Amino acid sequence: MTGLQQQVLRTDIGGMPLEWIGYQEAVKLYHDNRVAYACGSPLYTIHGGINAATANRSVIEVNSIIATLGTNRGNRLSGSKYTPPLNNPTLFRRDQQICLYCGEHFRSSELSRDHVTPISLGGKDNWNNVVTACRRCNNHKADRTPEQAHMPLIAVPFVPTHAEYIFLKGRRILADQMEFLSSHFPRSSLLHKRLTAAAAKTQPMLDTE
């Protein structure tokens, strides 16, 4: 059985990715008959109590991807106006733990959020204006634009879609979960292109520890 730390990908009934959940919440959804269908690989076999009348023990099989009944949040989250919340962990994962100025790979503790157009010059704190930068490059750039600092970006910042954001928030993503999520990425997805390029170089995408 897979370690209990492995997350389950929850979707709405239409198959739109919603969130990552732990096995306890997944079991509760199964128990409450809220799982419409499951796909992906089997993750857990959870044994419950023994029925006093029948002497049978309850068993719940939990798959890596489960579609759940309820409000169809996917329609709202998949809209073009949706913008995921900005935070450093997902920003660093979007940029593959790479400083977009020097091109070197760093651990999260060595990275920072840089505003391409500084706040002092009218720049916004949003996905299109922030990139991952090592502390040295961030300090060197200071309150200047990349052009002013003669530090060109090696990649373009972008706003992740909801499916991309769910991917960025995942831990230890299984192959079937990755395949499912990537099928929801836009054809023009910059994240998909980065993942493909990273795979071609046979390098691990992330090392966030």
Image (cartoon, rainbow, N blue to C red):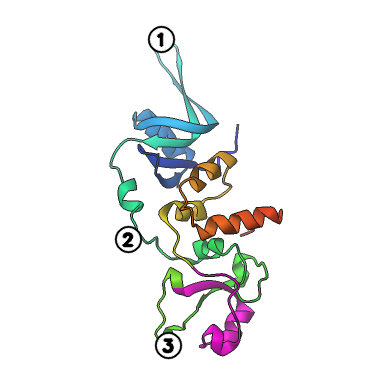
Task: Determine the image quadrant of residue 150.
Answer: bottom right
- Gap between marks 1 and 3 measured at Cα: 72 Å
In the rendering, which numbered label is found on residue 54? 1
* Residue 105 image position (x, y, % from top left): 67, 67
Q: Nearer the viewer, mark 1 or mark 2?
A: 2
Badge 2 is on which residue? 81
Please state the horizontal and vertical placement of residue 182, each as a whole percent of the image.
51, 48
Count neighbours of disc 2 (C-alpha within 10 A) and say few if under 14, some if 14 to 19, many if 20 or more: few
Is residue 205 visible in the rendered image? The answer is no
Q: Is residue 12 visible?
A: yes
Numbered mark located on residue 121 in the image = 3
Q: Which amino acid, by three-letter code, is at mark 1?
A: Thr
190 lies left or right of 198? left
Mark toward the start of the polypeptide (1 vs 2): 1
- Checking the image for residue 125, the label placed there is none
| Position of 193 relative to 119 (above/below) | above
Residue nearer the viewer, 196 or 51 = 196
**Of the two numbered discs 1 and 3 in the rendering, the one whose residue sits closer to the viewer:** 3
The answer to whether residue 144 is magenta is yes
> At label 3, which amino acid type do we have?
Leu
